[in-house]
Amino acid sequence: MTTVMGGETEYAISARDHAGQPIPQGPLLARFFAHTTAALKYSSMSSRGRFLRNGGLIYLDAGLHMEWATPEVTCPFEAVRYLEAGDLIVQDIATSFAAGSSDISEIFCSRTNVDYLSGTLWASHESYMHRANVKELPAQLLPFLASRVLFGAGGWDYRAPALRFTLSPRAHFISRTIDSDSQYTRPLFHTKDEPLSGPGIHRLHVACSERACSQTASVLRFGTTALVLALIERGARPGSDVALASPVWAVDRFAAAATGVSAPLLRGGRTTALAIQRHYLSRVEDAMDQLPFPWTSDVCALWRRTLDDIEEDRPRVAVTLDWAIKQRLFERRLAQRGIAWTSLRTWNTALDRIRRRWLKDAAQRPPFELATLLNPDGWLRTEMGKLSRLLGRQGLSWEQLPALAAARLELFELDAKFGALGENGIFNALDRAGALSHRVRDLDVADAVVTPPQDTRAKIRGDVVLRLSTEATSYGAEWTRVYDRARRRELDLMNPFETDERWREVSYLEDKHPLLRP
């Protein structure tokens, strides 16, 4: 018994010229990807980007962002290893790109999740192959996906006028329970089911997640989801007892705090994200003999230990999960600016009230921004005066607003730098200094840059990419096919567990696959 999974990371990339001005995003990314195709020595053309010798794919996705898709793996620890391999690949490309560009003085690459000022969102999707009944999946997975924010990336709620911390910034962008689109809408459950395998095998595409830096968080993201999916595949209905009255509302609420926040159940009563996760863990542990993956017991032990730490030992979580690491970091930075963490709730309440009154006459006013309050007109001064008593009860005053506004911009920047690639990334610096305890295994990430997984079709794809690239022949690759134009043959990889190269001669490659034309 085995399973297949993989992950994707969308990277935020920006650069400045020697005058310190930002280089326009469109031209920058076009140049970056052109450099990528030239810099990757062993890679194959595809309809989307370039497949590499390790079996993964790097490409410029819709919305103008670089994306890395791992090769197919059968273990959550391997999924994390190849995700981190993508980080190394993109960082190396960025370094050589900047070095070879005379107009670039600084380049920034990050596995960040949100640009809070523009509302730009970068995702980190997951894929799982399964044989479950696709019509039953939403009901069984929705409570799990909503409560999985406990392992979120952490950051800020982009809707807050001041600063509102969240376990999962992406949670607040989710607007639909179920949808087939993930580019223009943000569903909790994505129904897209691409035919990337043979008959009877489906693809679950999880589009509601975000990229974590912590290995613990990433292994839990892949491992727990794969186990719950395998449980459902075998006829269990773990979501029925914890069905949420409004999953979208629940995920927004659950992201507000790790404990103490509840949401209504469909059958009545209320529950917490922690209780839902414990419910799914219990169901998986009860069926352990039906889920004999080599890694099942390790993931379950990590799952239970992390939930216990969240509930009972918060200091331990503060060196393990992204959101808790960030919260401690942000609290300290605010304290250095003389701003108490507990004051943020009052600031948000006051600014929310002003914003609501501002928006009543939205047609006559520009968009509401915190900076507007720094130089208020007569109307704003009156509205601010009405809320002075609310602030005063917490020892606050409007004279402190400039400090809050400056801290807000600083913390947004700090969040982006947290996930930056390379030595300048805050998470990487903390990890290098020994301040964190997030690693779960000794993962050979450098090897994953050049070597494909050995137990899926990715091995064949990666080996063929290396061999045909070395031969300098004309060929192309996809997830389920490799096309050898020079020898007029096609390699079928529809079986995700294929171990042999099964080539067949064809005579229509140029017509069927225009990218292979000379």
Image (cartoon, rainbow, N blue to C red):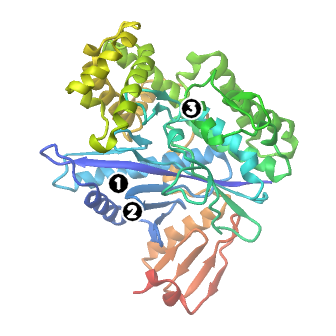
Give the residue type that dot 3 points to: Ala
Which is nearer the eye, 170 or 288? 170
Secondary element type, mark 2 = loop
Residue farthest left in this picture: 19
Which is nearer the eye, 144 or 513? 144
Q: Which mark is residue 40?
A: 2
User: Which label sits in the foreground, 3 or 1?
Assistant: 3
Mark 1 nearby-residue class (10 Å; few <14, some 14–19, many ≥20): many
Q: Which one is earlier in the sequence, the residue at label 3 or at label 1? A: 1
Mark 3 lies on residue: 255
Callouts 2 and 1 close, C-beta under 8 Å: yes
Between the C-alphas of marks 3 and 1, the distance is: 34 Å
Callouts 2 and 3 close, C-beta under 8 Å: no
Q: Is residue 493 above or below residue 238?
A: below
Give the residue type that dot 2 points to: Leu
Residue at the (41%, 27%) spot, across then down: 352
Q: Position of residue 38 (x, y in %)?
A: 33, 66
Q: Position of residue 308 (x, y in %)?
A: 69, 22
